Image (cartoon, rainbow, N blue to C red):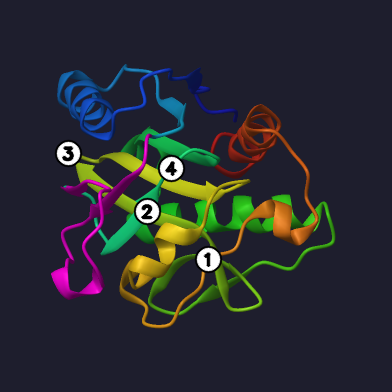
Amino acid sequence: MTKLQPVFKNIQERNYQKVCADMLAFTCQRNENTIDEIWFVEHDPVFTIGRNRNESNLLRATDIPLIHSDRGGDITYHGPGQLIVYCLMDIKRLHIGVKSLVHGLEEIVIDYLARFSVTGSRIENAPGVYVNNQKLASLGLRVRNGCAFHGLAINIDMDLTPFSYIHPCGLEGMQAVQLTQLGIQASRDQVALALSELMLKQFYS
């Protein structure tokens, strides 16, 4: 039986704190009949650090703002050329748990890479998607009353330098990689469309 389909939205707001406030408001106001929403966003440069934080994973002072976030996980970087997929999903209604959501989101990225004959992989206890032991996609989620928000970030074509200022997701020595370095030339909109199709198949079919 096909599940209630989500609404996919291209969000123009780039400020991290404003988008997070909007996500929290949506989640707090929704009820059992509220349709899930998937937001595609591109943020202005910002370091965000989650609830599993260790401030020492920021290795140097920079002009890039550091924002404390209510998502899970440690520190990461968001900036232009990176696609953020915020998953405002009623996982209770979908009959999935947090681990299944994380695994499914990783699978979506792995399946996308496979279209280009690129092998994506997981690392135990380090959510995300990796290629040749370099981090391509990060995951950070929060669940409130059975509803998830926050989500997935995938590097498309960006300045990766700020990742060298941190231990990405608390992983010492971890380097970031992006689609263009893997030979995948795709716009943000093209990646968003492909991930939308894979998300429907993964969670809503």
Residue sitting at x 38%, y 61%: 99
Identify the mark nearer the N-term, 4 or 1: 4
* Residue 159 x %, y %: 53, 51
Asked if the stretch drawn in magenta spans residue 64, the answer is yes
| Cβ atoms at labels 3 and 2 below 8 Å apart | no
Identify the mark nearer the N-term, 4 or 3: 4
What SS does tag 2 mark?
Answer: strand
Mark linked to residue 145: 3
Q: Amino acid at mark 3?
A: Asn
**Vertical order, 129 against 183 (above or below):** below
What SS does tag 4 mark?
Answer: loop
Residue behind mark 4: 79
Residue sitting at x 66%, y 40%: 198
Marks 3 and 2, how far apart at CA: 28 Å
Mark linked to residue 176: 1
Identify the mark nearer the N-term, 3 or 1: 3
Question: Can the viewer see residue 97 in this picture?
Answer: no
* Magenta segment: 44-69
Q: Amino acid at mark 4?
A: Gly
| Cβ atoms at labels 1 and 2 below 8 Å apart | yes
